[in-house]
Amino acid sequence: MSVNKDIKRITTHTIQSMKDNGEKISMLTSYDFSMARIVDDAGIDIILVGDSASNVMAGHETTLPITLDQMIYHAQGVVRAAKRCLVVVDIPFGSYQGNSRIALDSAIRIMKESGAHAVKMEGGSEIQESITRILSAGIPVMGHLGLTPQSIYKFGTYTVRAKETLEAQKLKEDAKLLESLGCFSIVLEKIPAKLATEVAIDLHIPVIGIGAGGGVDGQVLVVHDMLGINNEFQPRFLRKYLNLYESIKGAVGEYIQDVKSNDFPNEKEQY
Ligand code: KIV
């Protein structure tokens, strides 16, 4: 199916009608103006300003250190670039758990200071109060269940989640809860494909997967991973569309050679 370029601006309603019409939803992360401009021009449906910026942009081991101010900075550049897609921003760790007033303040700051269209939050029943409060301010919320990287120190590993019956049951209940609270969509990360398909069939709202198989309503990847900028990360679910690490390294190597040999700049490349 080709990209419908007639759509002026993708909204949460467009995303819902894609599910209703059986059209798969495409989502990628971006964290800056230049990348977001390319991704939006290509026709992506949703850009996620993920807190994976903590890993791929800042080089942290986990997503925990990134701050609300830093997420807003990343989101501002993306929003300036995005003419067509829906822009969703992760509320970072420590800015919504355990206190719904803080959660609301964080979501309002993201919306007001970046101009983004929605926020994403990790967790189910534990953060119910925060989700409800944010939704009551008119801010669309995308949920995130399964492997939730902000809880990595509780899980202890980045392995597949919800393989056991009890955890799978809790995930199904949480997905139903998020839908009933009013979330417009849910991300399911790194869970068995069969479970993710069951959740997608059970819910009316779109379910977007990462490492959750093809039976869901859409897919999301970290843009640096699918472009092969980061050559150390190779989980089973990742399809690499380019090897930008090697391309960029090669180009930089050529530039260095050209400078050292005085081949650059040539006659035409000067004033
Ligand atoms: O931060 C992120 O990039 C994410 C995706 C992996 C869904 O949450």
Image: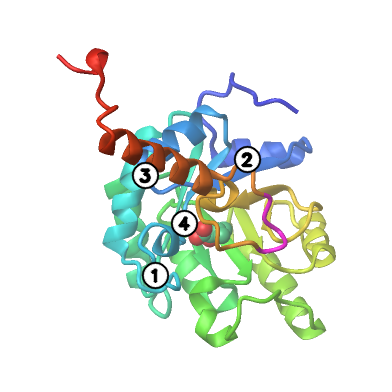
Say above or below: 186 vs 125.
above
- Horizontal arrangement in the rendering, residue 256 relative to residue 21 (left or right): left
- Horizontal arrangement in the rendering, residue 249 relative to residue 17 (left or right): left
> Can residue 233 be found in the magenta stretch?
no
Residue 15: image tag: 2
Residue at the image position 62 percent from the left and 64 percent from the top:
178
Name the amino acid, label 1.
Answer: His
What's the CA distance linking mark 4 and mark 1? 14 Å
Name the amino acid, label 3.
Answer: Asp
Residue 50: image tag: 4
Q: Are marks 2 and 4 in contact (CB under 8 Å)?
A: no
Indicate which disc, 4 or 1, sits on the residue closer to the N terminus: 4
- Horizontal arrangement in the rendering, residue 231 relative to residue 82 (left or right): right
| The C terminus, quarter of image | top left
Indicate which disc, 3 or 2, sits on the residue closer to the N terminus: 2
Q: Which residue is mark 1?
A: 60
Residue at the image position 28 percent from the left and 34 percent from the top:
261
Name the amino acid, label 4.
Answer: Gly
Residue 19: image tag: none
Residue at the image position 60 percent from the left and 52 percent from the top:
221
Q: Which residue is mark 3?
A: 32
Q: Residues within 10 Å of mark 2 (few under 14, many from 20)?
A: many
What's the CA distance linking mark 4 and mark 3? 11 Å
SS assignment for the magenta stretch, majority: loop
Name the amino acid, label 2.
Answer: Ile
Camera-side residue of 152 and 206: 152
